[in-house]
Amino acid sequence: MYAITGITGKVGGVAARALLSEGQRVRAVVRNADKGRLWSELGCEVAIAEVEDAAALTRAFTDVTGVFILPPSNFDPKPGFPEARAVISAVRQALDATRPAKVVCLSTIGAQALQSNLLSQRTLMEEGLSRLPLPVTFLRPAWFMENVGWDIDRAREQGVISCFLQPLDKAMPMVATADVGRVAAELLRQDWSGKRVVELEGPDWVTQNEIASELAKALHRPVRAEAVPRESWGAIFRAQGMRDPIPRIQMLDGFNEGWIKFEGNGATLIKGNTSLLEVIQNLVG
């Protein structure tokens, strides 16, 4: 039996379906019964738990072989990341109480970075779970290809995408969520000891100009990439409703300056097989 958190999202859902297709038993950890109905129909057990509720998570993780931890995303955290710390505390307590045979935790490229940024929430999660006496794998995927979904409307209507990753011709590792979920399921089926880091990228590194080119193919119209001046980022993000854009800006700086990157240093590197064009065609279609 494998307990899957974040099962209603793209990554968790793919991981769960991959396990089910292999005849594995899955316990869907969801926030409410409505979210669990589909997974119950697919043959999963359903456990109701908020990720900040240690007692509920303990019940959800009881008597399972492995657990997939998918922390909720928070793009506008309060200073000091109190929301992430609450989740980490609850998850750590539940895992310590139940002691599953293995844990796979979704982390991120750049989790080893010392500079504070939006992704530091995953750094804190790694630090919290590393102290547990359990086999834990931290899966660190690259930038999600699906982020291009935010650009499709403007590309379709105006033939332009606004780029915060710069320069436009700088290739960066990216990966499809389908590959992340698939690899997460594969890792859960493996046996290992201690802590390990697995880094995951797509088949090719991608530039912003290449994203524009692939969008042009999918939309059947010219599309160009346009760099958004850094001095305007704060105002743009605040206009979008963010209370504190600094962590997001720091994250983008990390990618652009190169200090948010794969660690290497003994980590296993896996390549996904889903191309950017496949992802864009699905998003556009």
Image: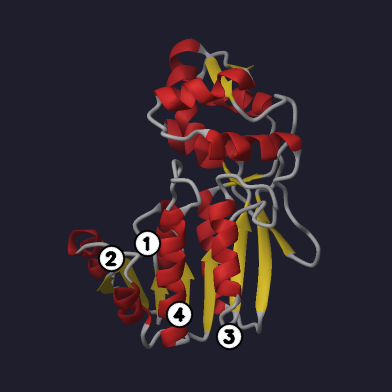
Q: Element at badge 2?
A: helix
Graded by Cα atoms within 10 Å as few (under 14), some (14 to 19) or many (20 or more), the crowding at tag 3 reads few
Q: Return the mark for residue 95.
A: 4
Q: Looking at the image, is mark 4 or mark 3 earlier in the sequence?
A: 4
> Which residue lies under the disc numbered 1?
7
Look at the numbered discs 1 and 4 and tell me whether their residues touch, using CB distance below 8 Å: no
Q: Looking at the image, is mark 3 or mark 2 earlier in the sequence?
A: 2
Q: CA distance from mark 3 to mark 1?
A: 25 Å
Graded by Cα atoms within 10 Å as few (under 14), some (14 to 19) or many (20 or more), the crowding at tag 2 reads many
> Which residue lies under the disc numbered 2?
39
Q: Image quadrant of residue 62?
A: bottom left
Find residue 144 and report its horizontal and vertical position in percent.
56, 44
**Could you tell me the amino acid type at mark 4?**
Leu
Q: Looking at the image, is mark 2 or mark 4 earlier in the sequence?
A: 2
Q: Residue at x 44, y 45 (%)?
A: 77
> Which residue lies under the disc numbered 3?
133
Q: Closer to us: mark 2 or mark 4? A: 4
Q: CA distance from mark 3 to mark 2?
A: 31 Å
Q: Element at badge 4?
A: helix
Q: CA distance from mark 4 to mark 3?
A: 10 Å
Q: Looking at the image, is mark 1 or mark 4 earlier in the sequence?
A: 1
Say which quadrant the N terminus sits in.
bottom left
Q: Element at badge 1?
A: loop
Q: CA distance from mark 1 to mark 4?
A: 18 Å
Q: CA distance from mark 2 to mark 1?
A: 9 Å
Residue 158 relative to residue 250: left or right: left
Look at the numbered discs 4 and 3 and tell me whether their residues touch, using CB distance below 8 Å: no
Graded by Cα atoms within 10 Å as few (under 14), some (14 to 19) or many (20 or more), the crowding at tag 4 reads many
Q: Residue at x 69, y 57 (%)?
A: 112
Find residue 116 and report its horizontal and vertical position in percent.
62, 47
